[in-house]
Image (spheres, rainbow, N blue to C red):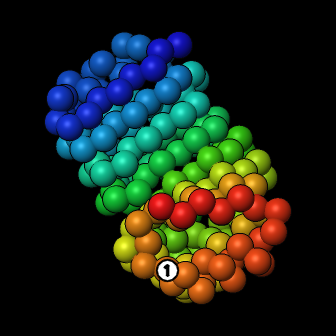
Amino acid sequence: AACLTIRDGSLSGEPAAMLVAQLPVEFLVVHEVSNTDAVAKELTGSDTLKWSSFDDCDLTDDGVHELPLEQLYSLSVPDTKVTSAGLKELHRCKELRCLALDGRQFDDEVAAVVRALPKLVRFRVRGTDVTDEHLERLRQLGVEELYLEQTSASREGVASLKQAMPRCKVFVQ
């Protein structure tokens, strides 16, 4: 299996999708690429994909629906067009260990779906729209590692979160 990184507009959706269709990709990183739903569609029948990152792309809910979520170990979709409605598809994830979202995506309904992921150990949430309200949702996750990146959460809120989750390593950037 291969590791494939497509970034910064080096390939757009259609050519990137053709490339993905020809390779048994296990690790896929797509960053700042347009038409990423086309790439996701090519991954529908993949039996090799385990790790995928679509940060800062135009991936939509339709693209998430196309991904082989049942077998993924890692999924990263912050700063995409993926909404909380599309993230309800995460219920299909039986192997997911790592998940990254942005604050806009992490609402109460998504938090409930994330809590039910049986193997999740690492959760990353980023963006200035992550507030102390989001920290309250995070308290309910049974993860071992939590990453807060570029958030608007208060120092007091983060301290309270760390106290409420003593077995969880909380990293703040």
Q: Is residue 100 above or below residue 25?
A: below
Residue drawn at x 69%, y 83% is 160
Q: How many marks?
A: 1
Specify whether residue 34 is in view.
yes
Residue drawn at x 51%, y 71% is 106
Residue drawn at x 59%, y 86% is 156
Q: Residues within 10 Å of mark 1 (few under 14, many from 20)?
A: some
- Left or right, residue 131 beside residue 122: left
Q: Is residue 5 above or below residue 83?
A: above
Specify whether residue 89 is in view.
no
What's the residue type where badge 1 is placed? Answer: Ala
Q: Which residue is mark 1?
A: 153
Residue 102: x percent and y percent?
Answer: 44, 65
Residue 169: x percent and y percent?
Answer: 71, 59
Residue 10: x percent and y percent?
Answer: 17, 29
Q: Quadrant of residue 115?
A: bottom right
Task: Choose between 104 and 13: the one closer to the eye.
Answer: 104
Residue 114: x percent and y percent?
Answer: 65, 63
Q: Is residue 131 above or below residue 118?
A: below
- Left or right, residue 20 beside residue 126: left
- Left or right, residue 89 beside residue 20: right
Q: Residue furthest right?
A: 167
Secondary structure, mark 1, is loop
Residue drawn at x 55%, y 81% is 155
